[in-house]
Structures are given as structure tokens and as C-alpha cells.
Amino acid sequence: MNQIQGLLLAGRYRLGDSIGRGGMGRVWRAHDEVLHRAVAVKELTAAQYVQEADRAVLLTRTQTEARAAARINHPAVVTVHDVLEHDDRPWIVMELVEGPSLADAVKEAGRIQPREVARIGLWTLRALRAAHTAGVLHRDVKPGNVLLARDGRVLLTDFGIAQVEGDSTITRTGEIVGSVDYLAPERVSGAAPGPASDLWALGATLFTAVEGKSPFRRTSPISTMQAVVEEEPGDLLYADALAPVIQALLRKDPAARPSADEAEAMLAEAAEGRRPDAAQAYVPTQVHVPPQPHPQSQPHPQPHPHPQSHPYPQPVRPERATVLGAGQPVLPVAPAAGHRGRWPRVVAACLAAALVGGGGVFAANHYLNAHSPSKSKADGNTGAGADAGTGTGAGGDKTPGTSNGSGGGSSAHKSGSIPDGWVRKDDVEGFSLMLPKGWERQANGNQVDYTPDGGDHFVRIAVDTSPDWPDSYHHQLDLERQVTKLPDYQQVNLQPNTFRDRTGSLWEFTWTAGNKDTTSGPRHAIEQTYVENDGTEYAIYLSVPAGDWGEARQQFDAILRGWQP
């Protein structure tokens, strides 16, 4: 990171401090030395570490973001000033908004007063209406993408997965893009999104702001999607006059939601503390059932598919996906036939694909934001998690357990030195760790691995800036419930401990990788997870062939001692 600070882009934009990051990139405060003004610069870090085919998709998405924002002329949309290329990837120069996101404000305050939420919703809706008029669907409206400027302005940002009318799609077959908490039911089904889908996401965003919690978030992305299509959003206890407006926006059937004009009138009344009469016409949400195909074309009900027979035949692997802040999840869904029938069947198809392609440890759910399954170069596994609430972490003098992996608890491990021949790796995502010489960084999408042999032995890093779980121990317990399906899974140790003088948890386990996996045979893994002082949850995960465990366990302790968040 320090090597990038001070960098001059295009002869005019001098990078300063990093002010935000996500799975796709990092945002920098910068100074425009030509116009002498402060700007924000978005760096597409993900493009450095993906395969060539995926890099083209990421570059196209970034260019789409710039074009989408440039088409919208509205004071509630963050202005894009420039797009440039440096180091073989695009950088976007944007208006700098001094102030937190709505997500940050909710996290800080717990919840926001309904009249203020209505005002925020009113300006966000106006930004969306301007976008829709310009032929742009945002497709990722959520609290993290609504900025609250210190001068009172409300601005919508991050059109990174927007769909621009007239452009060819940049979403590959079988993918859903967006944060699963805020995906409209019709988008979960695989239907083409429309303006009503953005209004649904706005309703979910307002619910989160006024109630202090996401209306549909559950313990995993799959259970969250199931809640979106099958369940009511929960009671609105603090919404006051805003409650019927949120209920109207969260109608399951997109045709039954209010138009942008109707919603704007409702929000304007709620912002004045008046309960909108027009909103009373909208009954509580009902399950929306897509049109049924002709009986002859209806596919036969099938039992839950075996992983090797599923249309997405990636092996079930426990390798965890990395969540580097708020990114754009890309969740696997069933092919066209899976979209037929009732909602539970659609969700079941999504679940099958996720468990097969999600690497077992799938449901770490943060806001979501994260989290896109992508096949790792290191081990051929597809990690997933729209909110994988895990992170990287380890280090300091306190490490879990003993060198043979039998420990845990809250005792401090004996301090030791870093072995000779090890080198420090300062990662582009901001963390630093010590590894043996020859371990190289491999990443695809949101995953960050270090490996000496293409993935037979590897360390995986993950970060979650807004963990949902009360502590790392309960987070790992939830993850374990999902990997018990692995062949020959056996827990060696899972218990809370103290790490870097912070509450953490150590999880060690074994399983057998199948013949179709990139690495087959008995495997042994260990993960230390903990929460730093700033509330960020870090995890560091090591996976090796079981026969190499003795040396690997000692390496793991040294890696923890050399860790720097």
C-alpha cells in the first residue's frame, strides 16, 4: 500500500490515503494537481490477480460503471470525472464525498430516525429515477452504496454492476450479481431485472436503516435468498410513518410495487412525519410465484443431486472464500430448467449449485458483501459467500494451541522466532505475513492464496470489516455445520482462544478430497479467526496433505507470529 501512496496517475492525480476497499478494488483519496481539487480514485485491484478471461469481465464492468454514471446528470449521483489506464488496468476518478456511507451510519448509531431515513430514501429514489430515465439499472442498491455527505447531501454511488440499455450483458451465464440481502425475488429466480428491482433494493435498504438490521439476512447466502422469496421481512418496530412505504416497496411481485413517482410522493410525506395515505393500499408482501410452464415441459422433480452429477460439477471443498470488504457477489444458479416451477424449487437448485461450487464453507454471511464464488488457481476450488464473515488474521506472540495441534483454549503460545529463509509478504490488500521463500500469491476474483506448489499446500487470507456473529467461535461453529458433508470430515479441535490479546477461535479438521478434486486424498486444515480492535474479523487458513501435517503445523505457528493486519 505504501508503494502506491504518492503515485501520480496520468500526470495529474496524486494518490493519498486509502479510504475504502472491496472485493473488486480500493478507493483512494487523491489530489488533482491540474484543477487543484480533492477527488476519489477507484483502483481495480482484482484485475491484477485473475485469469485473462475473468480480467476482461472485470475491466468491462469497470468501464460500464464509468459509462453508467456518466450518463446520469443528477446531484444525488456521484460524478465521474475521468477514466484512465495505469499498470494495465482502469482507474476511475470520481467526486470525493466527505462523509460515511449509510451502512457506516447504521453501524455507528444502531438505527436511524424514520424521518431522516425517509429523506435519505427520497434522494436515493430521485437518483434511481434519473438513472432509469437514462436507461441505467443500478442493480446493487444497498446501504454501503448510499453516501451521506457532511453537508447534508445524499448520493448514490458504485454503478460497477449496472446494466446500461444498449450494452451487451457482462454477466456470464449462470451468475447473479449483487448483494444477496438486497436482491429482488425476481432476480433470485433468474428473471431479467427492471426498475422495480432497484425499488425493491431501496425498500430493503430503508428497512435496514430504520430497524438496524437487514430484513432478510440469515445465516448463509442461500438461506437469505430463500427468505427473500418465501418470507415476510419482519415487523417494522421503529419505522413509524415510513412503515407502509417500505412494505409497498417490498412487494414480492414487481408489478405490484409502486412506481417511482408514487414512491417519491410517499417518501416525501413520510419525511414530513405524515403517514402516506397512498401506501395503505399496499397489503403485506406475498410470495410471488412465477408463471408455470406447460405441464409437458415441466421437468421431473429430482432428488438433491450428488455433487459429481450436478450441472456445476466442481468438487465440494472446504476451502474458504475471501471477503475483502464490500464487493459484488456472483452467485451460481441453476441453468434455465432450474428456474421453472415454484420458488422453493429454485432456491433448492441454487443451494445445490452453491454447495457443489462453494467449497463447503459457503455460508459465512456478512452483507453480504460480499462475496463471490470464483475458482481458485491454487486448489481448483470455488469459494463462495455473499457475506463470508471471515477474515484473515493471525500473528503476535499469542498463538492458538501447541505445535502438534492439540491445543486451543485461552492460553498464550510460547513466543518463537521466524525461521531462517522466510520472507515478508506485503499484500496489496493491506495485510502482511511471513512465509517460506518460494510461496507465491495466487488469486482469482476475491480469493487470496499463497502457495509453493500451485495449491497442494496453501495459506488463504480473508477479511470481514462488518462481521455478523457475536464472536469468532460461534462463526466457526456455523461454518462447521456446513462442512460436515465433506467425505470423512473429522473435527480435531474447535474452541475459543485468545489471539493478539483479542477474542478468537481455533478450528482444526481433516477430510478426504475426491479423485476429481485438484488435490485428492486425505487433507488437514487449520484456521485461526479473531476480531481486531476496530471490529474487523480476520482469519488465516492453512490446508495441506494430511501426511505433511507435522511440518505444516509448525509453519502455521510461525505464520501467526509474523502476521500484521
Image (cartoon, helix red, strand yellow):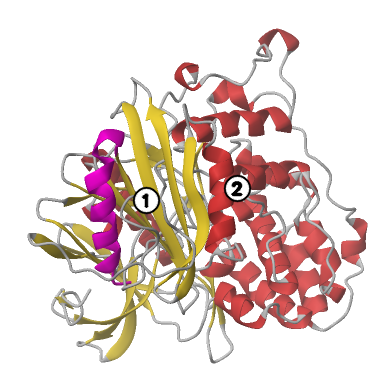
**Mark number, residue 220:** 2
Disc 1 target residue:
405
Residue 210, quarter of picture: bottom right
Residue in the picture at 48% in, 33% down: 489
Q: Quote the CA–CA distance across marks 2 and 1.
A: 29 Å
**Mark number, residue 537:** none
For label 1, the crowd category at 10 Å Cα-Cα, with few meaning under 14, some 14 to 19 and many 20 or more, is many
Count the labels in the image: 2
Residue 314, quarter of picture: top left
User: Residue 16: x and y, percent?
Assistant: 26, 83
Residue in the picture at 48% in, 36% down: 490
Residue in the picture at 85% in, 70% down: 237
Q: Earlier in the sequence, mark 2 or mark 1?
A: 2
* Quadrant where the N terminus is found in the figure: bottom left
Q: Is residue 464 left or right of residue 437?
A: right
* SS type, badge 1: loop
Q: Amino acid at mark 1?
A: Gly
Which residues, given as a range, are shown in magenta? 545-565
